């Protein structure tokens, strides 16, 4: 079994050091480990061309993903994304580590995430066969406690990189570590990263996928363990899973949330995916392999609109 570590931070920065500590723990448990720095990889940003999704050419024209022209506007040899995905798909466990930038992980992680459809990673939703047993964990480091959106996005990225399975087994977040390498002065943090690595190894060796983090690490959501909620129609909903429930107030504070059910009703379930498709295809007809089919009225409105807005306001181009 193999665990891949992906660092989104500086060379030998705090998040990379903690990642290596976690990978070392995996290695000590008998697992093979590998490590990459994401900044070493050139990743072209997704342009939203929809070649990989709405046109559905990836599966229909090339089910084994051998012809790059059927999956993305970018040929595989135009950047390093295919190499990165091959490393992810060749691993049983994944650990992502990153510093906090502006409350969130670095944008390079989102650039990586946005290309998932073209590699065929997205869409492998719950339930999944045991033969596809894979897990992930995350490590985050902030200079202060301005990290409110950090773990939800990093955790979501990690789970999506193993195919939307939401199989997060642990996560840790470290605050007040602003200087490069400063984490080496914090033995408690180093020990916590080691524990995270061991939890990943234990999950893989035991064939289990449950969240092993302690109560201090857990969030409100019992599926993705995220603490960022949105309020909708007077109810709480997980910002990541769209898992709904009602907060129970005790002494003026939220004591717990009565959730509606289990992972089978989150957005990562078959029902959730169907809702996602209905939201799109109830407003425009869609034929797999061909794309959108517009009414004559829609075609006219779009053609006339493009003529008007296509001539309005040229973009300011960069000077090179």
Image (spheres, rainbow, N blue to C red):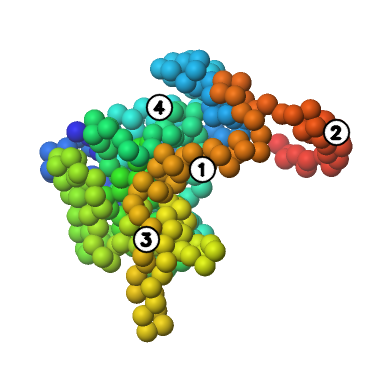
Q: Secondary structure at mark 3?
A: strand
* Mark whose residue sits in front, 3 or 4: 3
Q: Earlier in the sequence, mark 3 or mark 1?
A: 3
Q: Residues within 10 Å of mark 3 (few under 14, many from 20)?
A: some
Classify the position of the C terminus by image quarter. Answer: top right
Q: Report the disc number at residue 83.
A: 4
Residue matched to label 2: 304
Residue matched to label 1: 275
The answer to whether residue 142 shows anywhere in this view is no
In the figure, 196 relative to 285: above or below? below
> Are the residues tagged 4 and 2 within 8 Å (C-beta)?
no
Q: CA distance from mark 4 to mark 2?
A: 43 Å
What is the count of numbered marks? 4
Give the quarter of the image for residue 86.
top left
Q: Earlier in the sequence, mark 4 or mark 1?
A: 4
* Mark whose residue sits in front, 1 or 2: 1
Classify the position of the N terminus by image quarter. Answer: top left
Q: Earlier in the sequence, mark 4 or mark 2?
A: 4
Q: Residue at the spot x=42%, y=55% of the render?
A: 243
Q: Is residue 290 left or right of residue 106?
A: right
Q: Report the disc number at residue 259.
A: 3
Q: Residues within 10 Å of mark 1 (few under 14, many from 20)?
A: few
């Amino acid at each position: 079994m193999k665990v891949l570590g992906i660092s989104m931070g500086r060379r030998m920065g705090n998040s990379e050091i903690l990642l290596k500590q976690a990978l070392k723990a995996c290695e000590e448990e008998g697992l093979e480990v590998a490590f990459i720095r994401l900044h070493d990889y050139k990743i072209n940003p997704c342009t939203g061309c929809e070649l990989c999704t709405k046109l559905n050419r990836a599966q229909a024209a090339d089910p084994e993903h051998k012809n790059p022209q059927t999956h993305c506007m970018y040929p595989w040899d135009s950047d390093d994304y295919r190499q990165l995905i091959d490393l992810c798909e060749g691993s049983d466990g994944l650990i992502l580590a990153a510093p906090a930038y502006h409350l969130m992980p670095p944008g390079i992680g989102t650039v990586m995430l946005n290309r998932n459809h073209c590699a065929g990673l997205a869409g492998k939703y719950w339930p999944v066969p045991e033969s596809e047993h894979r897990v992930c964990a995350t490590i985050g480091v902030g200079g202060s406690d301005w990290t409110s959106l950090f773990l939800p996005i990093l955790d979501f990225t990690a789970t999506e990189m193993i195919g939307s399975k939401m199989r997060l087994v642990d996560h840790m977040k470290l605050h007040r570590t602003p200087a490069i390498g400063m984490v080496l002065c914090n033995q408690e943090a180093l020990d916590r990263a080691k524990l995270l690595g061991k939890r990943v190894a234990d999950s893989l060796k035991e064939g289990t996928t449950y969240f092993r983090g302690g109560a201090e690490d857990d969030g409100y959501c019992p599926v993705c363990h995220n603490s960022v909620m949105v309020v909708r129609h007077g109810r709480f909903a997980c910002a990541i899973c769209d898992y709904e429930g009602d907060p129970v107030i005790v002494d003026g504070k939220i004591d717990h949330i009565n959730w509606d059910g289990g992972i089978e009703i989150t957005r990562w379930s078959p029902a959730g995916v169907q809702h996602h498709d209905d939201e799109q295809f109830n407003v425009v007809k869609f034929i797999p392999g061909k794309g959108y089919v517009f009414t004559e009225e829609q075609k006219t409105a779009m053609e006339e609109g493009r003529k008007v807005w296509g001539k309005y306001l040229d973009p300011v181009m960069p000077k090179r």
